[in-house]
């Protein structure tokens, strides 16, 4: 288990996750990366307090819709070229945290085709809504 999951601020939260969102993205600083899109893998964990994500009537309006998370990722990619994975994960985290139900997010980005001898190179960030440090 990842140590960040043990953070006490996440104790009363539901974790919603999207694993291995596969995209073609215009990302990177090297000349070969600027010539076209490359494969990118995004993983996201969104933490929503149980108080606002426990359905009473089995309706999507009572929870955070997974489509919101997926569309947030895709919208950022569609904005065009981005140099750094760090910028990308920060942008996605900020957009997800703008949702009033979201307490915290973990966003990871991986580029699987950068090095022949490395499965992937990437970054991740864990962010909390302002005031929950």
Image (cartoon, rainbow, N blue to C red):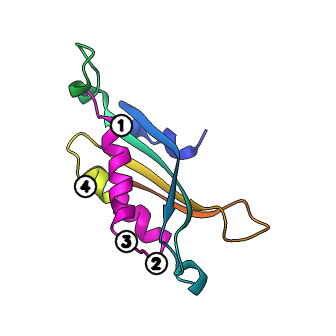
Q: Is residue 96 above or below residue 120?
A: above
Residue behind mark 3 = 80
Residue behind mark 4 = 130
- Circle 3 — which element? loop
User: Which of pointers 2 and 4 lies earlier in the amino acid sequence?
Assistant: 2
- In percent of width and height, residue 42 lies at 50, 53
Q: Residue at x 42, y 74 (%)?
A: 82
User: Which of pointers 4 and 3 lies earlier in the amino acid sequence?
Assistant: 3
Residue behind mark 1 = 66
Q: Which residue is drawn at 27% across and 28% down?
A: 63
Can residue 115 be seen from the camera position used here? yes
Mark 4 and mark 1: span between their CA atoms? 23 Å
Residue range highlighted in magenta: 63-92
Can residue 133 be seen from the camera position used here? no
User: Which of pointers 4 and 1 lies earlier in the amino acid sequence?
Assistant: 1
Magenta segment includes 88:
yes
Q: In this view, does 111 lie above or below 56?
A: below
- In percent of width and height, residue 132 lies at 29, 49
User: Which of pointers 1 and 2 lies earlier in the amino acid sequence?
Assistant: 1
Point out the frontmost of discs 2 and 4. Answer: 2
Task: Report how many numbered discs are placed on residues in the image.
Answer: 4
Point out the frontmost of discs 3 and 1. Answer: 3
Q: Please tell me the numbered disc located at residue 83.
A: 2
Q: Do the residues labelled 2 and 4 touch (CB within 8 Å)?
A: no
């Amino acid at each position: 288990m990842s140590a960040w999951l043990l953070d006490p601020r996440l104790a009363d939260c539901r974790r919603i996750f999207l694993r291995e969102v596969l995209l073609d993205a215009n990302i990177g600083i090297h000349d070969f990366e600027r010539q076209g899109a490359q494969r990118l893998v995004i993983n996201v964990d969104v933490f929503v307090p149980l108080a606002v994500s426990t359905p009473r009537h089995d309706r999507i309006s009572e929870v955070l819709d997974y489509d919101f998370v997926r569309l947030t990722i895709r919208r950022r990619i569609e904005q065009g070229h981005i140099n750094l994975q760090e910028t990308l994960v920060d942008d996605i985290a900020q957009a997800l945290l703008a949702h009033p139900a979201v307490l915290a997010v973990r966003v990871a980005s991986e580029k699987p085709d950068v090095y022949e001898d490395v499965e992937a190179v990437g970054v991740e960030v864990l962010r909390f809504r302002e005031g929950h440090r």
